[in-house]
Image: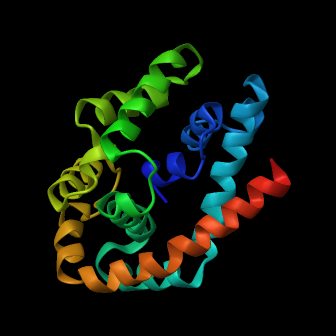
């Protein structure tokens, strides 16, 4: 899952949201520098990634993408799934998507002194282009994927991924609709017993 889903799956705990966002930016040895709640969020991020990467439905989405996008298929699936979460936000979120995203941006501002430089770099673009809110449109996903394609070391072809999403929209939406409730149930159980 990408940023929106990670933040959403953190529930109402603001420090857990910060940690879940930081999961891609903090090494295992550096985790202990953070508040215990943020550490829990980092661990939650890794648990979400592991569960997602090993799920049969997610693998099915990746297989559909692999011939065209190679090892970038997992990144693209994460983006697609964030698109479907944003697109169907009214089924999941307790507040509107715009309020949710502004709350998260405000939360990162309050915690900016503890965020690593790489996180600041991503947040700059995330806020400037309002990624989390714009994920709800095909244009927003296209812009995000095209931007990512410019930043990859190797040719990713991610600039064509929005066209693939449009072409096989129903298949990817079905994958998400099957997978996401299972992920939510798994994370709810994990948070009950592990956090």
> In the image, is 127 to the left or to the right of 28?
left
Q: How is the image coloured?
A: rainbow
141 and 72: which is toward the camera: 141
**Residue in front for this viewpoint, 70 or 82:** 82
**Which residue does the image show at 48% across and 25% down from the upper left?**
108
Residue at image coords 58%, 33%: 18
Q: Nearer the viewer, residue 108 or 49?
A: 108
Q: Position of residue 157 (x, y in %)?
A: 24, 65
Residue at position x 34%, y 79% from top?
Answer: 172
Quarter of the image for residue 184 reads bottom right
- In the image, farthest residue toward the right: 193
The image quarter containing residue 163 is: bottom left
Residue 55 at x, y percent in the picture = 60, 78
Q: Residue furthest front?
A: 94
* x then y, percent, for residue 54: 63, 75
| Number of numbered discs overlaid on the protein picture | 0
- Where residue 135 sits in the image (x, y, percent)? 28, 53
Left or right: residue 145 compared with residue 85? left
């Amino acid at each position: 899952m990408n940023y929106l889903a990670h933040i959403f799956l953190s529930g109402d705990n603001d420090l857990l949201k910060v940690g879940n966002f930081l999961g891609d930016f903090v090494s295992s040895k550096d985790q202990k520098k953070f508040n215990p709640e943020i550490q829990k969020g980092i661990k939650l991020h890794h648990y979400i990634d592991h569960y997602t990467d090993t799920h049969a439905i997610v693998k099915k989405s990746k297989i559909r993408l692999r011939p065209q996008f190679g090892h970038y298929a997992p990144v693209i699936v994460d983006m697609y799934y964030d698109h479907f979460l944003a697109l169907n936000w009214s089924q999941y979120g307790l507040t509107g998507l715009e309020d949710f995203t502004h709350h998260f941006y405000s939360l990162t501002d309050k915690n900016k002194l503890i965020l690593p430089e790489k996180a600041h770099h991503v947040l700059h673009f995330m806020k400037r282009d309002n990624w989390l809110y714009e994920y709800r449109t095909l244009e927003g996903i296209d812009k995000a994927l095209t931007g990512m394609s410019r930043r990859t070391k190797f040719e990713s072809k991610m600039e064509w991924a929005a066209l693939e999403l449009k072409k096989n929209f129903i298949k990817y939406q079905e994958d998400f609709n099957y997978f996401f409730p299972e992920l939510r149930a798994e994370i709810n159980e994990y948070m009950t017993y592990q956090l």
